[in-house]
Amino acid sequence: MHKTKETMREVIFAMLPVVAVVTILQISMLHLPWEVMWRFLSGAVMVGGGLFLFLLGVQIGILPMGEMIGAALARQGKLWLLVFFGFILGFVVTVAEPNVRVLALQVNLVSGGAISRSVLVYAIALGLGIFVALAMLRTIFNVPLVYLLVSGYGLIFAIAAFAPPHFIPVSFDAGGVTTGPMAVPFILALGVGVAAVLGGKRTTADRFGLVALAYIGPVLAVLLLGVIYR
């Protein structure tokens, strides 16, 4: 019950400023038809309700399940198992990410169908899955995050030199939409579960940085897709 009230309070405080600013603009400057304003208000209520249910679902199911999966895989003591399922979970959670679907739809419309929606979605999912697997390796072998970030972004800029110019902004957008409301909670929880089982002082920092690494994968995947399409 306490969790429900806290989540409701968070949603209200998140939505209220947006509604207040739009209402003030409507009264003082915009003077749009009130039919449009009522549609905005009703839409805000529906978005708030959906956000409340989503956050509640994340807290009740996704976060605990992600932590338990990460902990269970780490307890097996098999490197290949942790890396394999890190890749699989990263892949499937990206395919389920609604933001990725929106991006793929927009790119498909703008390109006139030249870039298939399914190809883009699966390329992004493949990139994120690979880098979630690398994040698992980084946690196990205690590789400093800065080395992976510098190497990853160096590779991004190197490949960007050969990719078509219109693929570059799409690739960075792909990284942004992938680290969205579906993927981030699960990836973070997975890393927390793995780090908690490994134990030791070094794992405190290892609980973080997974999303930063996950961002790199889709960017690289789309840039490589651009090189292929070229």
Image (cartoon, rainbow, N blue to C red):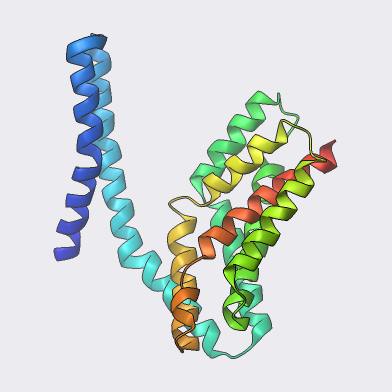
Q: Residue at x 54, y 82 (%)?
A: 73
Q: Is 205 placed left or right of 224 in the picture?
A: left
Image vertical order of residue 10 relative to residue 107, above or below: below
Number of numbered callouts drawn: 0
Image vertical order of residue 36 relative to residue 63, above or below: above
Image vertical order of residue 35 relative to residue 179, above or below: above
Q: Residue at x 26, y 41 (%)?
A: 48
- Give x and y (percent) for residue 91: 62, 60
Q: Residue at x 83, y 38 (%)?
A: 229
**Relative depth, front residue between 156 and 65:** 156
Q: Is 192 placed left or right of 215 in the picture?
A: left
Residue 63 falls in which quadrant of the image?
bottom left
Q: Is 63 placed left or right of 103 in the picture?
A: left
**Is residue 1 something one can see in this rendering?**
no
- Give x and y (percent) for residue 16: 19, 37
Residue 113 falls in which quadrant of the image?
top right
Q: Is 168 placed left or right of 173 in the picture?
A: right
**Relative depth, front residue between 56 and 15:** 15
- Give x and y (percent) for residue 27: 17, 14
Residue 43 falls in which quadrant of the image?
top left
Quadrant of the frame with the N terminus: bottom left
**Is residue 112 something one can see in this rendering?**
yes
- Give x and y (percent) for residue 46: 27, 37
Image vertical order of residue 77 relative to residue 45, above or below: below
**Relative depth, front residue between 192 and 64:** 192
Quadrant of the frame with the C terminus: top right
